[in-house]
Image (spheres, rainbow, N blue to C red):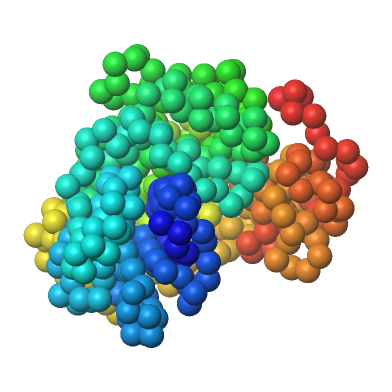
Amino acid sequence: MNKSFHIITFGCQMNEHDSERIAGILEKQGCHSSACEDADIIVLNTCSIREKAEQKFYSELGRIKKYKIAKPELIIVAAGCIAQQEGKAILSRAPYVDVIIGTSDLEKLPELIEKRFDSCKPAFDVSGDPDYHIKRLPALRNDGIKAWVSIMYGCNNFCSYCVVPYVRGRERSRPSDDIVNEVRQLAEKGYKEVTLLGQNVNSYGNGCESPVNFPSLLKLLNNETDITRIRFVTSHPRDLSEELISAIRDLSKVCESLHLPVQSGSNTILHAMNRRYSREEYLDKVSRLRQEVPGITLSTDIIVGFPGETEKDFLQTMKLLEEVHFDSIFAFKYSQRPQTAACKYQDDVEQQIKEKRLHEVLALQKNITFEQNKRQIGTVQEVLVDGQSKKGVRLSGRTRGNKVVNFEAPSELIGNLVHVSITKAGMNSLTGDLIIKEPIKTDEH
């Protein structure tokens, strides 16, 4: 199948990594990547976590329709969460889609494309491969420094607003040996950093035959691979254990940065969301983290306008932001998603109020983020240099706390760890001076 392909990705890191797998699968079939307008196959890897993401997908489908008109033999593939959720229903809005493939059926993509060629009818498979989590699919990674590594798929939490259990299924953990081997091989290829992916990495290992939980997996990767840095997303607050906090504190390769989605500061709303922790429990865990891992950077997710959210509930969220002082947040307006429990709730917060609350959350956090960044001035940070800065000819990299740093340095340092003295703080990044001309030796950690 000597054809060109182009992949358009929507959504989270899990989707980004799925797109790497799609590219790897197609490349293995003899295909090669190309610009969208030149491609024989266009894959839209979709996200359905929010209504806006779904709107973007259908808007993009409309945009590429012109390529299909100009080249009828073009194959358009809908993959990912919307494909899993909607299946053939996509054809009612976009009958020119040729292939629809589910989140754990990616290995079947070449077969479905061939089926579409042979039958001249749309091909689809959203049945789900029960062994997907134990298969090692090829991945075409474009970044030679940092890599995503999936450690588990699906979710068992059933938060009332979330579609993940319905589109990605229940939790399945990859065997720890497979994960260690993949990270080991990435290190051998020169990768310096991995980010472990899962809808709730804290529950890794549930249902596995081997007694390896998430802190144990981190220890294996820290001690048995030559990777330099380890990150992970996403952590459910309920499952943030003392053992995991100790692992972040004690394991030298695990970065002092944590994404810990709180969603709301109101106990009433947390209960309605089925988050299964209280505001007080969340704050207690943040306190433990900062006590055991001084300087840890924290980010979170916030949803405003959830059904039943009163002004008092909203102010509890604002108060929590002021108490915790997150380094960054991702904030969204609530939107009903099909199949979720919250679809049964009355979406009773007016759109105008949602807009106002989102604006207030973002404005407050903007000031907090700037304050947090200014705290870095005068410190010396270990930075993994990952490329040219977006602001001119300087280099750019990230601290262990996942903050972007721009600084003057020779391009030969890309891919290395360096020490940078922070001299200036901006809203979204830091500026500094390189203070060690030679790369840091990784055995220092």
Residue found 52% across the figure and 48% down from its top: 140
Residue 26 placement, left or right of 429: left
Rendered location of residue 208, percent (x, y)? 29, 21
Residue located farthest toward the left when viewing the structure as drawn: 344
Residue 113 placement, left or right of 296: left
Using the image as rendered, state which of residue 15 and residue 39 is in the foreground. 39
Residue found 34% across the figure and 74% down from its top: 73
Q: Where is 441 relative to 216, above or below?
A: below
Using the image as rendered, state which of residue 88 and residue 379 is in the foreground. 88
Rendered location of residue 138, percent (x, y)? 45, 41
- Res. 116 visible in picture: yes
- Res. 293 visible in picture: no
Q: Quadrant of the C terminus?
A: top right
Q: Where is 372 relative to 174, above or below?
A: below
Q: Where is 215 relative to 406, above or below?
A: above
Residue 388 placement, left or right of 8: right
Residue found 70% across the figure and 66% down from its top: 390
Rendered location of residue 167, percent (x, y)? 23, 51
Q: In which quarter of the image is the N terminus?
A: bottom left
Residue found 61% across the figure and 50% down from its top: 143
Rendered location of residue 356, percent (x, y)? 37, 75
Quarter of the figure with residue 12: bottom left
**Count of numbered tags:** 0
